[in-house]
Amino acid sequence: MRRVAVTGIGVLSPLGLDVDTVYANAHAGRSAIDRLDTPFAARLVAPLAATVRLPAALPFEPAKLRMLDRFSLLGLMAANQAVVDCGIALADVDRSRVGVFVGTGMGGTGAMDDGYRTLYEDRSDRIKPFTVIMGMHNAAAAWIGIEHDVRGPTLTYSTACSSSTVAIGEAWQRIARGELEMAIAGGAEAPLSNGSLKAWEAMRTLAPVDAQDARTSCKPFSAERSGMVLGEGAAMLVLEAWDVARARGARIHGEVIGYGVTNDAVHITRPTVEGQAAAMTAALRSAGLDAQDVDAINAHGTGTQANDATETAAIRAVLGAHAGRVRVSATKAIHGHLLGAAGALECVLSLLALRHDVALPTMHLRVRDPECDLDYVPDRAREAASVNVMLSNSFAFGGTNAVLALRSAR
Amino acid sequence: MSSTFEQLRSILVDDYGVAPELVTPEATWETLGLDSLAIVEMMWTAEDRFRIKLPAEQADLPTVAAVVSCIDGLIASGGSADRADGVGAAASDGPAS
């Protein structure tokens, strides 16, 4: 197996539009969750979201912008950032040995929502001709492939909230096995359309607005936790064979060293300790690590009753007595749940935590829950945390559990 | 009010990024850089803007002048009998899957 380096990072998230800003906000625990400011917000029970504030001028021609659903736009911009960051021109690489691996849970749901509004609300049959190409789940991956002339596998993974962890893991495997030299891998999601938000509201998994401070509405691992808050964004990595990256003197952000993916096979939404634990165990095994090698975990930590207690039990089941010494960060408290892009954003935050040797904070954890009894790094980041190996957890509706094992390049 | 040609040109320039000097009456879609998918979308936009319904067969409208003339004809004949918010154009001339 070849070692795999992360040589490029791109991110457009509620925490910021570049890596440094995202890290600064995550480190400071500044919440990007807030009241949703859109015309349809009045019809939402809990008008909350973590939005991406894009600049007015976007770096694409009007003709291209007309074809991009927001999830593709965010994904393409993040991929372009990552490619610039990796420091080489892809034109100099054998593009048949490069792949694109994108996770998205809901694809171009905004474009589909617009189409349905035309049909059902406006009672018009004039659906935009680009609706299909904007709505299709593989649009983001396809645009990234076109932009960078990638000729290898250009694949889309849709396993709900674990989509982009799966995408990064599958890309890692192909490079580790020698099938590819390089991959652009990550996730993109833009689920803040009216139809999507109402559908999530109907699931009764969304947090109500915190009466004191809307920004604190998502409270992972807290006894006060009351649900998740949806967010949008994209995060992309450039993964590269370690030896190739070293030979060209690339700046290496960190290393992907393992990946585990399992299925609960029990219930369409209810998580299981066994399935989550099996995914973490599989990631450790593929990385050749023991439980005590794990220094920190970026938890799935959604802020729902079911996830946080189950994940805590799963971490205990895998790490045993070592679990109490592991720093567990739930960054969704401040960037919301990016669904299919969540794993990629959290993988980026994990790589940044490894680079800075920091345990990122879990915010809004004021009241402890006896069922959630790990070290969640409440309120403030912990410096010089001796963080060398991390797991990044993503668990999904449908039951697909995915875990990445990451190592510092320090 | 600007002429049909001027309005169509502004659609091509603003929405599709076509260089203004390329938009002449004789210009074909190919010379303007519009492929079959873009043509379908551009015709849809023009229908919206002019409140008319263009014929489904794009081959009958190979140039800017042909579309301008078709739009003017539809507007002169009331256009509303076959209004744009009726049933959409047939897909037979759409892009291959």
Image (cartoon, coloured by chain):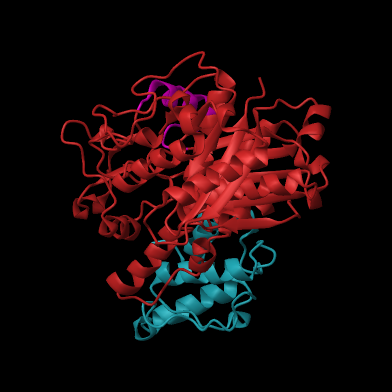
Chain colours: A red, B cyan
Q: Residue furthest left?
A: A211
Residue B72 vs B14, above or below: the answer is below
Q: Which residues are magenta?
A: A13-30
Q: Residue furthest front?
A: A321
The C terminus of chain A - image quarter: top right
Asked whether A240 or B97 is in front, the reply is A240
Asked whether A314 or A233 is in front, the reply is A314
Instruction: Give x and y (percent) for residue A354.
Output: 57, 24
Asked whether A97 or A270 is in front, the reply is A270
Answer left or right for A286 relative to A245.
left
Can residue A296 be seen from the camera position used here? Answer: yes
Answer left or right for B16 relative to B79.
right
Instruction: Give x and y (percent) for residue A212.
Output: 17, 31
Can residue A62 be seen from the camera position used here? Answer: no
Answer left or right for A54 relative to A365.
right
- Which residue is found at the position 53% from the left and 31% from the top? A350
Q: Inspect the magenta stretch and tell me whether residue B49 lies in it.
A: no
Instruction: Give x and y (percent) for residue B48.
Output: 41, 69
Question: Picture quarter containing residue A406?
Answer: top right
Instruction: Give x and y (percent) for residue A120.
Output: 30, 73
Q: Inspect the magenta stretch and tell me whether residue A25 lies in it.
A: yes
Question: Picture quarter containing residue A182?
Answer: top right
Asked whether B87 or A383 is in front, the reply is A383
